């Protein structure tokens, strides 16, 4: 018999409610054991080796990836493969992070004597503090759940979600403890938009030399308009004889001048330019330039050195082409 849409939605809502409650209950378990686990992971001189099998193994792979991308070198080892040679990947400089809801996973328990023989610290995320794994661990964090979201109470659902959330809590705590920055994060993610946003300097995309639209304060307004048209950046930067920035003339300034019925053939650009314009220094992240443009609702920025001289012009379209926006 076909299931009704309302029933499907009710089942989904129940799953989300049960899993949300499981995660919410973890907050009370962030105690001294959590802090000790963080200390062991921070003191690691090698890498964090994450172990797990079945669904916790998939969660372990994600936790290892999150740790590695946030400043804590880590990798995942399948416990069954560890029993057949991959145990050699674990060194005395490492820390083992083992995941098991029951705490009695045979493939992990088989490795415990070898881990102890290496003298490697063992941190466990387990759903049973009285289990063999929990008792063998230097620190065990309780990730138990009152029920699985699966209506049969069999498929790992709430338990894997809780383990994943606690793994994220460890990773973020370590990130903060290490003073990990956005620039550090970008170096771990150099590809794609994230890397471009966090690593690209405006020097890499700004217009320089003859590409910069420039006008003198005594230039006629019509000549400034021609300069804007030739360079195609929607602005011209007004500079003195030493290239020091005096202001900018933009499309907006043109509209305001026309509203005042200014004669473009006789008026000088200094009469209609925007003085005290926003500028930015070379070597600044392109993402910071984007932030300024959005904050002040402008489409172009003069790039000015320490002496106030024009060294480049950046346009919003440059950031769009570079994938920063």
Image: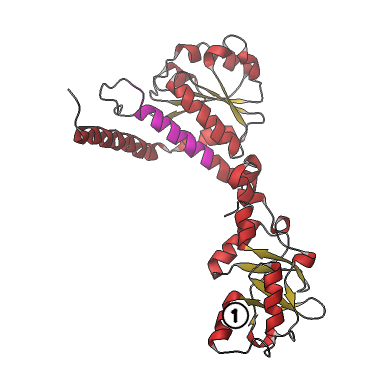
Q: Is residue 278 above or below residue 190?
A: below
Q: Quadrant of residue 225?
A: bottom right
Where in the figure is residue 192, as x and y percent of width and height? Answer: 60, 43
Q: Residues within 10 Å of mark 1 (few under 14, many from 20)?
A: some
Which residue is labeled 1 in the image?
254
Say which element carries label 1.
Answer: helix
Residue at position x 40%, y 24% in the image = 129
In magenta stretch: residue 187: no
Where in the figure is residue 113, as x and y percent of width and height? Answer: 55, 12
Q: Is residue 272 above or below residue 227?
A: below
Q: Quadrant of residue 319?
A: bottom right
Which is the main secondary structure of the residues drawn in magenta? helix
Residue at position x 56%, y 45% in the image = 176
Q: Residue furthest right?
A: 242
Where in the figure is residue 42, as x and y percent of width and height? Answer: 60, 36
Q: Nearer the viewer, residue 57 or 146?
A: 57
In magenta stretch: residue 169: yes
Q: Nearer the viewer, residue 233 or 19?
A: 233
Which of the colour schemes (rainbow, by chain, secondary structure, one colour) is used?
A: secondary structure
Where in the figure is residue 102, as x and y percent of width and height? Answer: 39, 19
Q: Quadrant of residue 147?
A: top left
Is residue 99 visible from the viewing direction of this image? no
Quadrant of the drawing holding the C terminus: bottom right
Q: Is residue 208 above or below residue 30?
A: below
Quadrant of the drawing holding the N terminus: top left
Residue at position x 71%, y 74% in the image = 227
Residue range of the region highlighted in magenta in the rendering: 155-172
Is residue 168 visible from the viewing direction of this image? yes
């Amino acid at each position: 018999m076909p299931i009704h849409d309302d029933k499907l939605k009710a089942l989904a809502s129940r799953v989300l409610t049960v899993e949300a409650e499981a995660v919410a209950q973890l907050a009370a378990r962030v105690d001294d054991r959590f802090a000790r686990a963080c200390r062991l992971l921070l003191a690691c001189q090698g890498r964090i080796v994450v172990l797990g099998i079945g669904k916790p193994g998939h969660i372990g792979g994600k936790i290892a990836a999150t740790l590695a991308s946030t400043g804590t070198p880590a990798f995942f080892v399948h416990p069954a493969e560890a029993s057949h040679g991959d145990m050699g990947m674990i060194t005395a400089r490492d820390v083992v992070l083992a995941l098991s809801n029951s705490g009695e996973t045979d493939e992990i328990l088989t490795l415990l004597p070898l881990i102890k023989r290496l003298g490697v610290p063992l941190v466990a995320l387990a759903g049973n503090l009285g289990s063999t794994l929990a008792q063998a661990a230097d620190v065990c964090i309780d990730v138990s759940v009152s029920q699985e979201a699966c209506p049969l109470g069999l498929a790992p659902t709430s338990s894997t979600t809780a383990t994943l959330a606690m793994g994220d809590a460890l990773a973020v705590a370590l990130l903060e403890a290490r003073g990990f920055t956005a620039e550090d994060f970008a170096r771990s993610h150099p590809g794609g938009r994230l890397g471009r946003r966090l690593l690209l300097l405006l020097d890499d995309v700004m217009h320089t030399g003859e590409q910069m639209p420039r006008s003198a304060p005594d230039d006629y307004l019509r000549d400034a308009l021609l300069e804007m048209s030739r360079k195609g950046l929607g602005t011209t930067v007004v500079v003195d004889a030493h290239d020091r920035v005096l202001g900018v003339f933009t499309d907006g300034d043109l509209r305001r001048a026309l509203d005042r019925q200014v004669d473009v053939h006789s008026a000088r650009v200094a009469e209609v330019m925007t003085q005290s314009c926003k500028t930015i220094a070379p070597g600044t992240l392109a993402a910071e330039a984007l932030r300024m443009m959005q904050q002040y609702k402008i489409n172009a920025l003069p790039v000015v050195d320490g002496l106030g001289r024009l060294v480049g012009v950046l346009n919003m379209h440059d950031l769009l082409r570079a994938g920063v926006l």
